[in-house]
Structures are given as structure tokens and as C-alpha cells.
Amino acid sequence: MAFAIVLSLTSIGQVRKYSNEFLAIGVGARAMAMSKANIATVNDVTSGYWNPAGLIGLEKKFSVGLMHSEYFAGIAKYDYASFASKIDDESSFGFSYIRFGVDDIPNTIDLVDQNGNVNYDNITSFAAVDNAFIFSYARALPVEGLTIGANAKVIYRMVGDFANAWGFGLDAGAQYKLDNWQFGATIRDVTSTFNAWTYSLDARTIEVFTQTDNEIPENGLEITLPRVILGAGRLFEVKKFGIQPEVNIDITTDGQRNTLIQSDPFSIDPYMGLELSWNKMVFLRGGLGNFQKIQAEVGNFKETTFEPNIGIGISFKGVTIDYALTDIGDNSVALYSNVFSLKVDFNKPE
């Protein structure tokens, strides 16, 4: 059954790799084009997702951000909306909402009735949706160039009427600017994030699960362990032109992953991005990330693959439109996705 596969992806009272992984996809076409390498340099409304300390860099009183992208030929849809505002010269706050969902999934539990007859009219549909509500706060410290920030995350995940989960977690971030150098650090799920799953399976569903040797899920906790992301970048300016490279490393703590540097429980995933700009109005971006080791088609050895991304952006009078062409991780052109994002910065009307 389709939704049996979805339910099997959830964990019951244990730590599992890739838990709440929808929160690792990324937001903002600028960051996606740079292969997510912007922990150190992010300074706009998307900071609430990447590094809350960056909210101090808001250029105007208010900022609104929107993004939409689709994956797997439009099967999965990813939406993001955010708002941020300056409280004063030393503090800012923000709110972000993320939805990642697959809609209209066929439910074939009743396709074959108890008499063995196939009835396609019994096929219904449901949605599997992950939601995250992120509340952010940032503050500048007395140390020149140093800012810190924190996120409080509320997570709601649901699989039709069969299962749902509520979760809560905290993130912490910091940025430090030294001349043209910028350094950043983010600890996601710093205290671990706990999702409490509740299942509502009727007798018919349990019967079908039993007959097809599917595991009957039980209420329990899904635990997301901390993730540390470190970054460094530098801005080079020549008249109206700007060059801003950045390198990040993503350190996960939930066991060995297929990354460039693998171990248990820590795995390290490096990625890098570059932004070229003219007059802070036109931007050209690129990045490399998602380094993986896969079995070669010929020979008994593994080869290293990576994910390239590119994008452009235009900013004029507080309105910024960004675009990214980004791979979802298998280096296949057929699975490249178009990501569009909009950002509007404005002050309070006179």
C-alpha cells in the first residue's frame, strides 16, 4: 500500500538518520545556487532558516521572503514564507514557515474487497505533509562584529488521517565579521528535536497490514540529533564589482552517512559557493556540494560524485528576485529543479 511505505519512513521511539530531513533541503534561491554555502554571509530574511544571527544584517526595517520549488517531476512541492523585522539597531526577530508535501497519494487499502473483487471506485487519496514554524531572534554583542541568534521550532507532520506528529526543537547560531572576512556557525537541533507520533489505524487497515506482512506502527518518539554547520567567506570588491566565495562544512551526529568524510557517529559534508555581483544589483552564482562516493560502473572501486548548482539574481529598490537550477543529488539532468524566490525589503511608511 502506498501509505504503508510512507508510514515505514517514520521512526518509533528511536534515533534515526535523516529524521526531519525536510528541514535540510534549504530555502532561498541564492543559497540553493551556492550549494547552501551561506552560513557565514547570510544577512537577510532567510537568516531565520540558515543562521538566525544573520538577521542583524537586515538593511531595512521589514523584510518578506517567499520561495516555491518542486521535486521529482512535480510530485513533491516545497514552499517557504518568512517575515523579519528590526527591533532596534542591536536586535531583530523573524518568523519562517516551511511546507514540504506530496499530495494526492492513492490509498489502495480497499481496492480489493473482502470477497476478493477489485473495485477501483474504492481508491481514495491522502497527503503526506511536513510543516515547520520557526521563530527567530538575533542580537549584536558588545564585541565588535559578533552577533548571536536562536530559533524555536514547532514541527507538525501528518500522513493523511493515519498518523501525525508534533515536535519541538531549538537552533543556535553566531556570526563574526573581521574586516572583509565573515565567519559563521549554526547548531541545529542543539538539544535534539523530538517528534511525538500518534497513529490512527482502523480495523480494516490493520487487517490488511497483517495479511501483507507490514509492520503495525505504534505511537512513539522520533529523535533528531544535533547538526553543526561551520562557514567562512570573504568579500572582494573592485569598484562596482564584488566577488564573495564561501566554504561550509556540515557535521552530522546521527551515524555514518554517504559523505566525503565518513565515520560513526560523525560524518562531514563540505560544500562551497561563489557569488559575483555588479553594483549590488545583478548577481551570478554557482556552487558545488553533496559529495558522495558511489560504486563505479566499471571496476571494483568507488568514485566521488558531486552536485553542481547555478543561479542568477536581480535586486532593485528593495525587491530581489532570485533563480537557481539545482540538482536533487544524483547528478542527473532529468532531476534538476527550478527554484524561484522573492524578497522584499521596506521601511515603515512615513
Image (cartoon, rainbow, N blue to C red):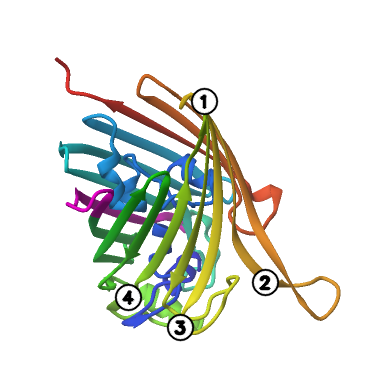
Q: Amino acid at mark 1?
A: Lys
Q: Residue at x 31, y 81 (%)?
A: 218
The local crowd at label 1, few if under 14, some if 14 to 19, many if 20 or more residues have their Cα within 10 Å, is: few
Which secondary structure lies at badge 3? loop
Q: Which quadrant holds residue 63?
A: top left
| N-terminal label among 2 and 1 | 1
Q: Which residues are the magenta region? A: 122-148
| N-terminal label among 3 and 1 | 1
x, y (%) of residue 38?
Answer: 44, 49
Q: Main secondary structure of the magenta part?
A: strand
Which residue has dot 3 on it?
265
Q: Where 259 sits versus 320, above or below?
A: below
303 magenta-colored: no
Which residue has dot 4 on it?
222
C-alpha distance separating marks 4 and 2: 28 Å
Q: Residue at x 16, y 43 (%)?
A: 90
Marks 3/1 in contact by CB < 8 Å: the verdict is: no
| N-terminal label among 4 and 2 | 4
Q: In the drawing, what numbered circle is on residue 76?
A: none
127 magenta-colored: yes
The local crowd at label 2, few if under 14, some if 14 to 19, many if 20 or more residues have their Cα within 10 Å, is: some
Is residue 133 found left or right of 11 in the rendered image? left
Q: Amino acid at mark 3?
A: Pro
Q: Amino acid at mark 4?
A: Glu
x, y (%) of residue 50?
Answer: 37, 52
Q: Amino acid at mark 2?
A: Lys
* Of labels 1 and 4, the one closer to you: 1
* Of labels 2 and 1, the one closer to you: 1
Which residue has dot 2 on it?
293
x, y (%) of residue 328?
Answer: 58, 54
| N-terminal label among 1 and 4 | 4
Which residue has dot 1 on it?
239
